[in-house]
């Protein structure tokens, strides 16, 4: 059974040196910031649906239940969806392929193989996974994004860390391992969501992910469109914190820690290094 279900024209969509960006609702998506980021990319003008991953093989439907919808055509069962879209980016060096959905319960290696097939068919040059974790981040500052890559050359070129975590993992960990073994370079971007504000929506976290993605790839992400929503979100949290003296003091301590962090390199520097790495990869191939 082939779980990757292409649309009739999905295999034929022409893309320019595409990058694959993925995010999944679940443990690695606090406040649903990562999937909201990918969904915004998928809704860009000119995006085209490429494929779905059949949920039958990968979900325990007692845990992730489908739901019934009544529409113009009558009763319809809506199943958990993991969908791929092509996103043209004519002003950048790369188009995007984006996948947004729900972390499956079963057969993670097979699920990862579906993404490898998607990447190979579309000619993807690099994969970027987006995630969000609760952490020690103050809501009063731009939420920090940590980047890492197992590939030493990628990490060195883009100034990213190398993975050091040991312990239980999720789909993203399995996906990184599977993609690296298939020879596909992978970058992980993870935003830290304030642990005292863990619920969605969090436009500040989504904006931070999109801004860092644009910084590394040079692909415009429209993150500035979230400026007002992020400001409104921050004001609401400000008002709640002001009523709690202990929490307000704690936030000030977090601010002091963040303000001591180092500045990141410029977007032009990182985009140039990414292009140099991908050029070297093509030359070696």
Image (cartoon, helix red, strand yellow):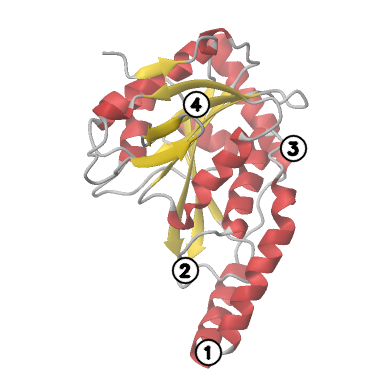
Is disc 3 in contact with disc 4, using a CB cutoff of under 8 Å? Answer: no
Q: Which residue is located at x 26 percent, y 36 percent?
A: 59
Residue 244 is labelled as 1
Label 1 and label 3: CA atoms lie apart by 42 Å
- Residue sitting at x 51%, y 37%: 155
Residue that carries the numbered disc 3 in the rendered image: 268
Q: Which of marks 2 and 1 is nearer the N terminus?
A: 2
Q: Do the residues labelled 2 and 3 touch (CB within 8 Å)?
A: no
The residue to which callout 4 is attached is: 84
Mark 4 is surrounded, within 10 Å at the Cα level, by few (under 14), some (14 to 19) or many (20 or more) other residues, namely many
Whether tag 1 and tag 3 are in contact, CB under 8 A, the answer is no
* Disc 3 to disc 4, C-alpha distance: 28 Å
- The answer to which of marks 2 and 3 sits earlier in the sequence is 2
Label 4 sits on a secondary structure element that is strand
Residue that label 2 marks: 136
- Percent from the top left, x then y, of residue 248? 56, 85
Separation of disc 4 and disc 2 at Cα?
33 Å
Sequence-wise, the earlier of marks 4 and 2 is 4
Residue furthest out toward the right:
91
Name the foreground residue: 202 vs 79: 79
**Helix, strand or loop under label 1:** loop
Q: Is residue 234 above or below residue 65?
A: below
Q: Label 3: state its secondary structure.
A: helix
CA separation in Å, label 2 and label 1: 18 Å
Give the CA separation, mark 4 to mark 1.
44 Å
Give the number of the mark in front: 1 or 3: 1
């Amino acid at each position: 059974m082939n779980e990757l279900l292409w649309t009739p024209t999905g295999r034929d969509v022409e893309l320019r040196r595409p990058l694959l960006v993925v995010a999944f609702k679940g443990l690695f998506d606090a406040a649903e910031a990562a999937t909201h980021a990918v969904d915004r990319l998928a809704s860009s003008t000119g995006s085209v649906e490429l494929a779905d991953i059949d949920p039958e093989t990968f979900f325990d439907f007692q845990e992730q239940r489908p739901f019934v919808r009544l529409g113009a055509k009558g009763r319809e069962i809506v199943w958990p969806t993991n969908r791929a879209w092509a996103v043209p980016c004519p002003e950048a060096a790369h188009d995007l392929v984006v996948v947004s959905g729900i972390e499956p319960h079963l057969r993670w290696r097979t699920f990862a193989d579906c993404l490898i097939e998607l990447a190979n068919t579309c000619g993807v040059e690099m994969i970027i996974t987006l995630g969000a974790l609760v952490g020690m981040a103050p809501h009063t500052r731009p939420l920090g994004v940590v980047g890492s890559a197992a590939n030493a050359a990628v990490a060195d070129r883009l100034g990213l860390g190398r993975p050091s975590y040991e312990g239980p993992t999720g789909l993203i960990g399995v996906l990184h391992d599977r993609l690296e073994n298939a020879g596909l370079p992978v970058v992980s971007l993870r935003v830290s969501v304030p642990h005292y504000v863990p619920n969605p929506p969090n436009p500040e976290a989504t904006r931070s992910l999109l801004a860092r993605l644009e910084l590394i790839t040079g692909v415009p992400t429209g993150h500035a469109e979230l400026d007002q929503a992020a400001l409104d979100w921050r004001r609401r949290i400000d008002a709640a914190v002001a009523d709690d003296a202990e929490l307000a003091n704690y936030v000030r301590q977090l601010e002091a820690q963040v303000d001591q962090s180092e500045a990141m390199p410029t977007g032009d520097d990182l985009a140039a290094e990414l292009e140099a790495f991908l050029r070297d990869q093509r030359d070696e191939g």
